[in-house]
Amino acid sequence: MHKLIMYHEVHKRHRDGLKPSQISRDLGLDKRTIRKYIAMTEEEYLEFIHNQKDREKLLEPYEEFIKTRLEDCEDASAAQVHDWLKEHHNDFIDVNEKTVFNFVLYVRNKYGIPKPFNNREYEQVEELPFGKQAQADLGEYNMSTDERKRKKIYFFSMVLSRSRQKFVWFSEHPFTTLAAIAAHDKAFYYLEGIPGEIVYDQDTLLLIDENKGDLILTEAFRKYAEYRGFKLHFCRKSDPQSKGKIENLIKYIKYNFLRGRVFVNIDTLNGQVMEWLSRTANAKVHSATRKIPCQKWLIEKTYLKPILNSFIPASILDEYDVRKDNTISYKGNFYRVPTGTYKPPRTTVWTELADDNRLIIYNTNNNKIASHKIYCGKGKTIGGNNYKRDFSSGIDQLINELCGEFANPDQAKKYLLQIRHDKPRYIRDHLQYIKKLMVIFNMEVMNQAMDFCIENKIYKATDMGSVAKKIHSQVTRETVITPPIIINTINRSAHKIIPNKSDISDYQSLMN
C-alpha cells in the first residue's frame, strides 16, 4: 500500500509539471526510479510489485554474510560489498553490479540498516592524450586492529589521467622525502613507465596537518623530478577540474578498500591492496570512461617514458662527512649521529632540510639515523643522550654475548628474551645494566642472582642488581673470620662469675 501511494504521488507531481529531478529531491527517490514509475500504468506497476515479491534472488546464499558486514560497516557501498564477496568467496558467481546493488538495498531494507549519503558532484573534463599526465596525492586513514584499537596508516596514490590505471602504497609512518620518492618509484615500476607531468594538490602537500612530516616540496624532491624527467604541476585547493581524478581515487581507496578492513600489519595491507588493484580497482569498468583501466593501460604504457636507471638517493641529497666524534658539521654547528656511525678511514651520510626546519640525516642504506631541530646560533653541539648510546651493537648480538658468560647460557637467553618481550623499548638499557653488573660482581654471584630471578619471575635488570648485591653481601659475611671479643673490666675476676640458674621444678609446679 505504501509503494502504491508513492506511485500515485509521483504521477500527481508529474501532472503538476515537476521534472523527475525535482520529484527525486522531494521524495528522496532515484531519478531513474521516478522515470520508471512515470512510464508505467497502474496495472503494470501492480504486476511489477507482484513479480518483485516472488522473484528468486541469486545472492540469497550470501545474505547472512552481507548482513553481518553491513552491520559492522553501515556506510559500505554496494561496490565495496561486491568486492568483499569476491575476496571472501572463491566460488562467488559472476553477477552484474546492478544485481549486487539491488540485493544490498534489499538487505538494508529487510534488516533496517540505512546508509548515510554524502554525495559530491564533479564536472566532466576533456580527456588528455596517452602518457601526458598522472595525478598523485597522499592520504591517511584510521583503521581498526584485531584488539579493536585504532591504527593510523598513511598512503601514497597515483592514477594515470587517460587510462585511469591506479597505484596505492601504504606506510605506518608519515611520509618523509625519501619515503615519498620511494613510493613514486614503486608507482613508476608498477605502471611500467613515467608520465610527462604529475599533478599535485599544492595545499594538501604543503600542510603537515594531513600528512605529518610530508616533505614533498623540498629541494630534494625537485631534484628527483628532474632526475626522473617529469614536470611538476601544483594546482589550487578544491579544484576538481585539475585534480578530480586523484580526489576520486583517494575517496575510492578509503571507502571501497579500507573501510571495514582490519589492520594486521603493513606488509599484509600492501599485499591486499595489490590484489585489490588487480581484482577491482583496475579491472572494473570506470564510471566516467566506460572502459576497463587495465585494458586502456596496455595502450597508454607504450606512451610513457621508460625507466632507464635505478634511483640513487645521493643524487638528490647533500653529502657530509662524519667526524671521529660521530657528529657532522652543518652551518657552524655540530649535529650528533648515533655512536658507532663513524667507520675509519671515512664515513659519509646524506642530509635534507625538512619543511619544519629540521635536519634529517640518512646513512648510505637510505635509513634515517638522526633528526635535529636546526639551531640558529653558532658553535653548539646538537643532540641529546639518545645519540650517545652504542647503536653499533645489535640487540641480538648483545644478548648472545651476555648469555655466553653465564653457566647456563640457554636459561640466561630465555630470561633476557623475556625482558625484551616485556620492555622492548628499553631492552638495550636493561642489557647494558646487566653487563655493568657482571663487572661489579663475579659470575658465581651473577649465576645465583639469575637462578633466583627466574625462580621468582623477576624480569627487571635493576631488581637483578639488588638480588646480586644481597647475595654478594651474604657471601662476604660468611667468609669474614670474626676476631675474639676481649672483655676489659676493672674486676679481672668478673668473667669468672657464674650466674644463678632456675630450677626446672619451679616451672613444672606452676604449670600444674
Image: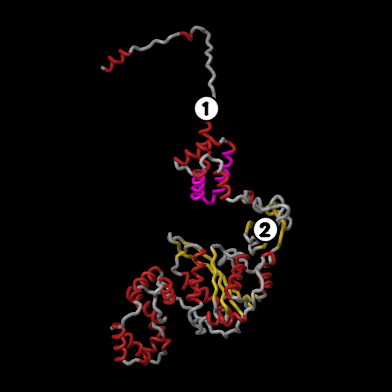
Q: Nearer the viewer, residue 418 or 144?
A: 418
Q: Indicate left or right for 379 with 182 as reference.
A: right
Residue position marked by numbered label 2 in the rendering: 374
**Element class at badge 1:** helix
Q: How far from the left and from the top, in percent, is residue 76? A: 42, 73
Query: Is residue 277 visible to the viewer in this orientation of the structure?
Result: yes
Query: Is residue 377 visible to the viewer in this orientation of the structure?
Result: no
Q: How far from the left and from the top, in percent, is residue 456? A: 44, 40
Q: Is residue 451 magenta?
A: no
Identity of the residue drawn at 69% across and 64% down: 314
Residue position marked by numbered label 1 in the rendering: 477
Identity of the residue drawn at 36% across and 78% down: 103
In the image, residue 437 above or below residue 40: above
Q: What color scheme is it?
A: secondary structure
From the image, which quarter does the N terminus lie in?
A: bottom left
Q: Residues within 10 Å of mark 1 (few under 14, many from 20)?
A: few
Give, as a single range, the part of the protein colored magenta: 412-438
The three-letter code of the residue at mark 2 reads: Ile
Do the numbered discs 1 and 2 sit on residues whose CB atoms are within 8 Å? no
Q: Is residue 421 magenta?
A: yes
Label annotation for residue 98: none
Instruction: Name the dominant secondary structure of the magenta segment.
Output: helix
Identity of the residue drawn at 53% across and 17% down: 484
The three-letter code of the residue at mark 1 reads: Arg
